[in-house]
Image (spheres, helix red, strand yellow):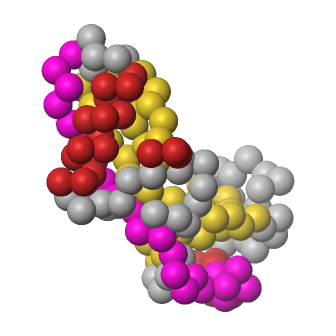
Amino acid sequence: MIAKHEAIEIARRFAEQNSWPWDSRAATAVLNTDAWCVATRVDDYWVENVYADVDANTGNVRTASFRPAVSTPISRERAMEIGRGICEQNGWAWREVDIEEDEFESDDGKRLNCWTIGTNRDRLGGNATIFLDAETGAILQTFFASR
């Protein structure tokens, strides 16, 4: 099995081969069963970030992605307006609303910075979750949990 520092080095080389920026000071790795999950700046949202799964036995990169930093995010207020409009359009409750900076992974593995809006959080059901692209305000995904 490869060591943690080897997994980080493999991920760094992979990032550099793809012209992705690498922050050595903020790189970390966690062993998850048979793969090292290597990432830079994992606790910071809306910053450029590299993520790679490195096979713990072979050292091969299984998956990897780069998330660009947000340069001109839509405001929290604008995200709330969009979220409220989606809820009104669908007849979903708009109460107990929370919003946070987050990250969204699309079906094609692309990672985007997003606003995550949750509604009706004081109830078990009738809750909406809305993911909006932080740069454009485009709707990435919505969920509604009925009773």
Q: Does the stretch in magenta take in 37?
A: no
> Could you say which is closer to the camera, residue 5 or residue 117?
5
Q: Residue at x 52, y 81 (%)?
A: 71
Q: Does the stretch in magenta take in 67?
A: yes
Query: Which residue ends up furthest to the front in the rendered image?
Result: 25
> Could you say which is closer to the camera, residue 48 or residue 140?
48
* Total count of labels: 0
Residue 117: image quadrant is bottom right
Vertical position of residue 131 compared to residue 72: above or below:
above
Q: Is residue 111 left or right of residue 82?
A: left
Q: Is residue 13 left or right of residue 75?
A: left
Q: Residue at x 48, y 86 (%)?
A: 136
Residue 144 in the image: state x and y as whole percent: 57, 61
Q: Residue at x 55, y 66 (%)?
A: 46
Residue 66 in the image: state x and y as whole percent: 34, 59
Q: Is residue 131 visible?
A: no
Q: Is residue 72 visible?
A: yes
Vertical position of residue 67 compared to residue 72: above or below:
above
Vertical position of residue 64 compared to residue 70: above or below:
above
Vertical position of residue 126 compared to residue 29: above or below:
below
Q: Residue at x 20, y 58 (%)?
A: 18
> Could you say which is closer to the camera, residue 121 or residue 29?
29
Q: Is residue 90 left or right of residue 11?
A: right
Residue 52 in the image: state x and y as whole percent: 32, 42
Q: Quadrant of the N terminus?
A: top left
User: Magenta span covers which residues?
Assistant: 57-80
Residue 115: image quadrant is bottom right
